[in-house]
Amino acid sequence: MQLPVMDNAGREVSQVELPGDIFEAKINVGLMHQAFVRQMANARQGSHNTRSRSEIRATGAKWYRQKGSGRARHGAQSAPIFVGGGLAHGPKPRDYSKKMPKKMRRGAIRSTLSALARDEQLVIVDKLDVDSPKTKQMRNLIETLVGEQSALLVVTPEQKVVRKSVSNLPNAHSIAANYLNIRDLLKYDKVIMSLDALDVVISIWGMGV
């Protein structure tokens, strides 16, 4: 598959051949969904904790007499049906993480990249360089390439100035190519990738690796 390579002014300067094993793989929506659910589940802390009846500090004395009041019999104010009582079957700390074989995780990323390339959501640029961390300059660059659409910028780990320039933009986000993940790839309308970042993606996600 060939895609045009754009410069920072939005002009096509060349063509790039994308490897078919990454950008023309079979698109498996079910696999992509499974990988997305796994990533979101693994991001959960699971630190929620509610107090049960036995953990409520309340008097142990009988609330009111057993008979004669006309009310139901109760032995403690900590019962879940009373205000201030314990919570029945409430959440406790737990581990939400899910496991997924490495081969399936890699297949999900390839499937996602292939879907982006097929739907023309992938924009390749020759380089993403700014002189200093300037939010306005980066916003103008993104608008030149993709208009008003939201964008994910895939850069190399060394492009720290670019990442700082994107950090304050509400509809854009940057990520290092070696931390590519399915949640960020699916979240934005367009994915802008520099040629240097493309080399990193190919070296990590290629079939020969």
Image: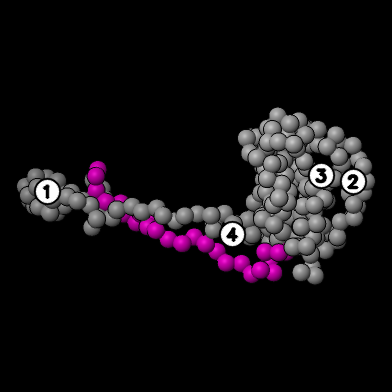
Query: In front of the other: label 2 or label 1?
Result: 2
For the point 13% across and 50% down, the residue is 59
Marker disc for residue 4: 2
Per the image, the residue denoted by label 4 is: 38
Residue lying farthest to the right in this orientation: 14
Per the image, the residue denoted by label 1 is: 63
Amino acid type at image mark 3: Lys
Q: CA distance from mark 2 to mark 4?
A: 34 Å
Residue 85, magenta (yes or no): yes
Query: In front of the other: label 4 or label 3?
Result: 3
Q: Residues within 10 Å of mark 3 (few under 14, many from 20)?
A: some
* Magenta span: 83-107
Labels 2 and 3: the sequence-earlier one: 2
Which structural element holds mark 4? helix
Image quadrant in which you'd find residue 113 = bottom right
What x and y, as percent, mark residue 1?
89, 55
Labels 1 and 4: the sequence-earlier one: 4
For the point 69% across and 41% down, the residue is 161
Which structural element holds mark 2? strand
Per the image, the residue denoted by label 3 is: 127
Q: Quadrant of the C terminus?
A: bottom right
Labels 1 and 3: the sequence-earlier one: 1
Q: CA distance from mark 4 to mark 3?
A: 33 Å
Nearer the observer, 55 or 19: 19
